[in-house]
Amino acid sequence: MSDRPKTQTLDRVTVPADLKALSDRELKLLAKELREETISAVSVTGGHLGAGLGVVELTTAIHAVFDTPRDKLIWDVGHQCYPHKILTGRRDRIRTLRQEGGLSGFTKRSESPYDPFGAAHSSTSISAGLGFTMARELGAEGVGDVIAVIGDGAMSAGMAFEAMNNAGHLGKRLFVILNDNDMSIAPPVGALSTYLSRLYAGVPFQELKEIAKGAVSFLPEPFQEGARRAKDMLKGMTVGGTLFEELGFTYVGPVDGHDLDQLLPLLRTVKARATGPMLIHVITKKGKGYAPAEAAADKGHATARFDVLTGAQTKAPSNAPAYTKVFARGLIREAEADDRVVAVTAAMPDGTGLNLFAERFPRRCFDVGIAEQHAVTFSAGLAAGGMKPFCAIYSTFLQRGYDQVVHDVAIQRLPVRFAIDRAGLVGADGATHAGAFDVAFLANLPGFVVMAAADEAELMHMVATAAAIDDRPSAFRYPRGEGVGVELPERGTVLEIGRGRVLREGSRVAFLSFGTRLSEVQKAAEALAARGISPTVADARFAKPLDRDLVLRLAREHEALITIEEGAIGGFGSHVAQLLAEEGVFDRGLRFRSMVLPDIFIDQASPAAMYAVAGLGAAQIEAKALEALGVSMVGKRA
């Protein structure tokens, strides 16, 4: 295409081995073209732009020095892997990023041998890298050096330090590159972030500490003098690599991650000389080289399609507020009425809407960093201390804190309120970010109240209901994206615990919906009505405790009962089936069907396409009702 950047050097690269034929000067040209190609590609597809732009030179240097795929390059999270994908044989598909049938927005083992470990959740790279390292040490073939690239935000998670502690103990050769851009999704928080800031603010010279004792002399010029001066500056100080070296790593840095004159000699040196675990501290700038990204508050973390010249994003106008903003609105209303209401998130204040809450109540909002386990138990402590904590975490990330949900919250019956965003299928982020399992793993916990909002007004009511539950834990889930456009109350109304609602009375077949598939259920009901079948439509509201009276009435008064939910098997429908079985309803011939997400991980596509794969669209709900009733789909509508 004529509007694509000219990439004469990049055109010579199909796989990383091709970089070996390039001079250092040509590698600089390659990096420039790689940045332009990344910007051009993401302008077409949308996606995670800023993180990739921040590691263009680092990606180039790693692939120029190491020998992937034998050497295993593991990108933590994977937001920054687009330049890596361009250099590893996938350039011809890069404009399919995050599209149905296209490249994943994260690293993916099934996609390429250059992606040795899949990602999308944070802080896993060092653990995985150490696994590869020990596989190599135990004789596994095809494993060379291991390089884990982890961002500064990801280093706030305990798992990263657990892995480093273990790696330091084992003492084997492993390269961990700390990509320190002072910017994760939100500005990184906590003492570690402050520590890293002190490192490069307090040491203006590049500190290249000895890779082996007395080894400053083998470092390439001009690093020798810089290393000596930095080492002298650090005597008696608690900055530098002290923290990492106490964990058993040799620390090198910080170095300029956008200067190939620094990166290439450094990586060549450590590759030639390192014997044990090494941490290389690289300073980068998220969004580097693209002014609109550099100027953005989130440095262009996640963008829609955009105009390359202006950076203006193309977003469809919304007719309804996003669920996330509705949650924030509801929580602010509760906090205005009760000063014990506090909010906790794990590095996702914007994504969960708590940035809006923080503007109104800065002292009552806590971003704990990428640390979901801590977020849950911290919330439990707040609850035990008499506060009313709302722990707002995406469904996919709440999985990381499940032990704490069970042991620190549920067993102690502490009234932590879990606001579960991104429930159900999420579109371009694919299987890794889908909220499929939270109903199943929460509704089996004794004493838990588990709710799902059918629309944005219901979400307001569930925020109010959770605020009022003070004797046990509770959770309410809601999807990504816009609501259905219902009128919102000024403040939510407290719902009766364990009571659903009937929206449409009918006969023969009853739909019992849990969550936002209700709008599709209502479309299916209209289609059935056109066939002369008038179904009952009910919104369960609660998966736990179930509305026993409603479930048993629907079973008693209809030939068929169908549950519909945006979750995996073992959730709402399973609880309904258990109740029906215990009450002997199946003995009397009820035709029961449970519509859930299928037993597969669904690849990225539009949400509508993903729900079509899942079989949870209006047409499929209609077909399920007809099948249950024994009615053919063929034939004239009444």
Image (cartoon, rainbow, N blue to C red):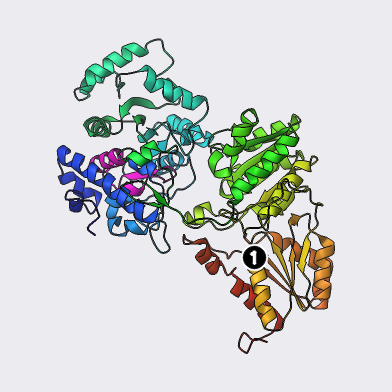
Which of these two is toward me, 138 or 413? Answer: 413
Query: In the visual, does 602 lie left or right of 577?
Result: left
Q: Position of residue 384 (x, y in %)?
A: 75, 32
Residues rendered magenta in the picture: 55-83
Magenta span has 79? yes
Q: Residue furthest bottom?
A: 635
* Image quarter of the N terminus: bottom left
Which of the 4 quarters of the picture holds residue 519? bottom right
Q: Residue at x 48, y 32 (%)?
A: 188
Which of these two is toward me, 29 or 371? Answer: 29
**Residue of label 1:** 519
Q: Is residue 584 above or below residue 76?
A: below
**Does residue 594 appear in this view?**
yes
Q: Is residue 277 above or below residue 318?
A: above
Secondary structure type for disc 1: helix
Q: Amino acid at mark 1?
A: Ser
